[in-house]
Amino acid sequence: MLISYFTEQPYSALSAEDAWDLHPFDHPARRAGDNVLIHSNRFFDPVAASRLYAERIREYELAEEVGFDGVMVNEHHNAPFCMQARITVMSSVVAARTKRVKIVQLGNPLPTWDNPVQLAEETAMIDMISNGRLIAGIVRAGGAEQLANNVNPAYNRERFHEAHDLLIKAWTVPGPWRWEGEHYHQRIVNPWAVPLQKPHPPVWVPGITSKETIEFAARHAYPFVCLNTTMEDTKRIWGLYDKVAAETGFEAGPQHRGYLVRCIVAETEEKALRNAREHLWMSGEFAGFGRPTWIAPTGYSSFEARTGRAAMDKANSSLEGQIERGTMVVGTPEQVIARLRWWLEETRPGLLMLWPNDGRLDHESSLDAIRLMGEAVLPSVKKIAQELGLHDQFELASG
C-alpha cells in the first residue's frame, strides 16, 4: 500500500473578523457565498503567507522522515482554503526538498490549461528533477476554477478529454508534429523535456461521484481516488469502475483504488476532536463556502453528478455526522487504526491519502500530528494492508 500525506495548505492567517468567526452564520458576505471565488485579496498578507509556505514545506519534509510514501499536492484558485495556486510550482519545491516520497499531483486541472504542451514540459521537468517520483494526477477542476481561469465551464469535459490526449501524446510521441483539435491548436509540438518514467509518469484521477469521470478512469486503467466519499458511495464507485474495467478488458484491483480521508490523530480523544473541528472551518464554516451556481455552473457536469454531490455535502454537514459515517477518522492512535482497518476491509484500496491537519491548526500542532501518525499509525496500517493483500501499482511492478 502507498500511503500519502496531504494538506490543502489553507491561508490560516485571516483575522477573526476577516474569517467571519465572530458571526459566521450571520455575516452578509457568508450569506452571499462569496468566499471561494471573490473573497477580496485585500485580506491577504504576503508576509504571513511566506511564513505559512515555509511551514508547509517543513511539514512535507517531516512526512517523508516519519515514513509516508508520498506527499500529495493540489491546486485551487481564488480560494483562501488553498495557497497552492499552481500545482507544478509546489511539486517542484517538494521534488527539490525530498529524496524518497512520491510526488502525488491530485491534480493538474486540464481544462484550465490553454496550452497542455506546456504542462507536458513542466511535469517532465519535475519527473526528472525528482528522479522519477512524479505521479501526474489529472482533474476536471471545480466549477469555480473555470470561472477563476476564465474558461467556459460548458466545455469542461470536452477540454479535459482533448487535453488529456494531447498531454499523453506530447509525453510519448517524438516531435515535431501538429495538433488540430476542437479546443487546442498547436502548430508545432516538440517538447524538448520529456519524462524520465516511461512511457510516462503514472496518471491518477481523483473525483467524487461523477459517473463520467469514473468511467473515464476505468477505460484508461487509471487509479481512481475517491475524495472523502461515504462508505456507500465508495462501494458504488468501485462497482462501476470494476464493471467498466471488465468491459475494457482488465480486472481491477486494489492498485486501481485510492481513498483520501481526513484522519486526525492525537494523544487524547479530546485533543483529536479539537483539532478535527479545524477541518470544518475548511469545509463550510468559512473557507469552503461558495455559491452552488459557482461550484457547479450550468453545463459543468451532469444532473446525476450534481445531485450526488449535493447529497454528499448534506450528509457531511456536522463533525459528529462525519465521524459516525467514517468520512472523518478521529481519535487516539488505537481508535484511528481500528477505524482505518474497517475502511480497508470494506473498500480495499491500495492507495491511501491521509489528511491529518488543516484549517487554523498551528505549525507545532501540525508537526506533532505528523510525528504521531508516523510513529503510531503508519506501521499498523501497513501491516493491515499486507494482511489484506492491498498492493499498489509500484509494489506489483517490482514483484
Image: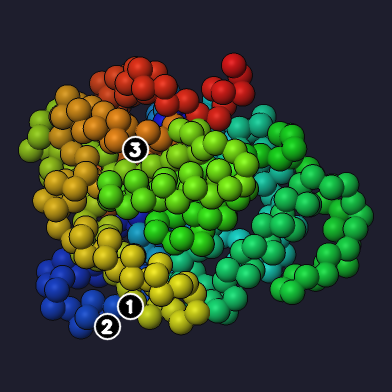
Q: Which of marks 1 and 3 precedes in the sequence?
A: 1
Determine which residue is flagged by label 3. Answer: 347
Give percent across and percent down for residue 117.
Answer: 75, 58
- The residue lying at 46 percent from left, 82 percent from top is 298
Q: Can you tell which mark lies on residue 291?
A: 1
Q: Can you tell which mark lies on residue 32?
A: 2
Give percent across and percent down for residue 358.
Answer: 29, 48
Are circles 1 and 2 on residues that touch, CB within 8 Å? yes
- The residue lying at 74 percent from left, 74 percent from top is 182
Badge 1 element: loop
Give percent across and percent down for residue 80.
Answer: 36, 63
Q: Nearer the viewer, residue 233 or 79?
A: 233
Q: Which of marks 2 and 3 precedes in the sequence?
A: 2
Badge 2 element: helix
For label 1, count other residues whose C-alpha is less than 10 Å away and answer few (under 14), some (14-19) or many (20+): some
250 horizontally vs 243: left or right: right
Q: Amino acid at mark 3?
A: Thr
Q: Which of marks 2 and 1 precedes in the sequence?
A: 2
For label 3, count other residues whose C-alpha is less than 10 Å away and answer few (under 14), some (14-19) or many (20+): some
Q: Nearer the viewer, residue 1 or 264?
A: 1
